[in-house]
Amino acid sequence: MRGAVFLGDRKIEIRSFPDPTPGPGEVVIQIKASGMCGSDLKFYRPPPGEAQKALGLGNNTEPFIGGHEPCGVIVARGPGVSEREAPVGQRVMNHHYAGCGVCGHCRVGWSQLCRAGIVVYGVTGDGGHAEYLKAPARTMVPLPEELSFSEGAAVSCGTGTAFGALRRMRTQGGQTLAVFGQGPVGLSATLLGAKMGARVIAVEANAGRLALAKQFGADALVDASKQDLVKALKDLTRGEGVDLTLECSGAPAARQAAVRAVKTWGTACFVGEGGEVTLEVSPDLLRRQVTLIGSWTFSATGMGECARFVADTGIDLERIFTHRWKLDQAAEAYKVFDAQSSGKGVFEF
Ligand SMILES: [Zn+2]
Ligand SMILES: [Zn+2]
């Protein structure tokens, strides 16, 4: 099979590999769609292994097949995997983490929290930017019939991460929700938050992405390149501040504003990876009873719930893709994505 290998320092190469054979407990899926997620850039840009180390994901410096939003069809089962567990031909998304499989976190579907060490497909193990992917059967989540493979790929990280964070914040109809950063995760949060009934305020510095946010259901827009974010958000909420903020950009100034723009008793949530933030604990948090949440993706069950929500509420998630690529175009695809002015890209097979 062919796979797009991340070599580090913004280099990608298409290489040939033997077709994977499933071992005990494993399945092989034929990839139909493999999404591009903002965090891929964290592994695409720096020298090999640097980002993995900084993000606490091990010390692997070997080149690897990228892509942690794999979606496809089960084509082979290894020893010990039953027909009921993984029927050949089943359409599936991959919850892209493998833990020990037996600890408390793994058993409830939160295998990324496993303390025994994890494989992250597309980051520390071979991912979805290839014709086939081999992973434990327990990491596969059925894809609802209503969703396309590309939509399933989006749910497999970007859209699922937005959904997981909105659920953790207990987003409700009638609340105000400010979403910082309108890349693939932020745009999904705008779309899902609006569907959940929240009044969404999109915060973003790129004009094209702001315009997309409007189309995806944002009630108001804040141009982060021109406006004082905290003031703008207070002006839009009668001086009170917003109920919920979701910070997807990872920029320190945006993180600070996301905490400061919530109202008293409000909740701020960080999903943007890496880096730091400086807060003044008393005025920013304590004196206003602020809840600050860190949210890392979602469980395998949560991923299924996200797909179900998208299907049941009739969201057209195909609209989130501005670029569709073939695997051979991987180098060009990441060059375009690296400019961070477009929407989401996907490899379709
Ligand atoms: Zn475990
Ligand atoms: Zn991701």
Image (cartoon, grey):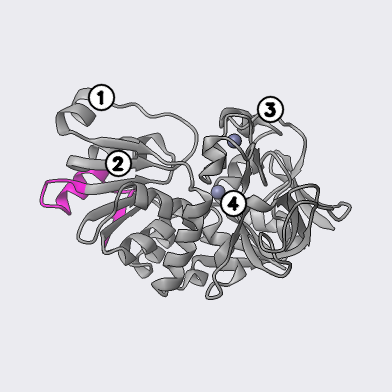
Residue 162 picture location, percent across and down: 42, 53
The residue identified by callout 3 is 59
What residue range appears in magenta?
219-242
- Residue 55 disc label: none
Asked if residue 32 lies left or right of residue 37, the reply is right
Residue type at the position of mark 1:
Glu
Decide which of tag 1 and tag 3 comes sooner along the chain.
3
The residue identified by callout 4 is 95
The residue identified by callout 1 is 280
Decide which of tag 3 and tag 2 comes sooner along the chain.
3
Q: In front of the other: label 2 or label 4?
A: 4
Does the residue at mark 2 contact the one at mark 4 (Cβ under 8 Å)? no
Decide which of tag 1 and tag 2 comes sooner along the chain.
2
Residue 302: say if magenta. Answer: no
- Residue 268 disc label: 2
The Cα atoms of the two marked residues, 3 and 2, are separated by 31 Å
Residue placed at 47% from the left, 51% from the top?
A: 161
Residue sitting farthest toward the left: 238
The Cα atoms of the two marked residues, 1 and 3, are separated by 34 Å
Q: In front of the other: label 1 or label 3?
A: 3
Which secondary structure, mark 3?
loop
Residue 160 visible to an observer of this rendering = yes
Residue placed at 34% from the left, 42% from the top?
A: 269
Which secondary structure, mark 1?
loop
The Cα atoms of the two marked residues, 4 and 1, are separated by 37 Å
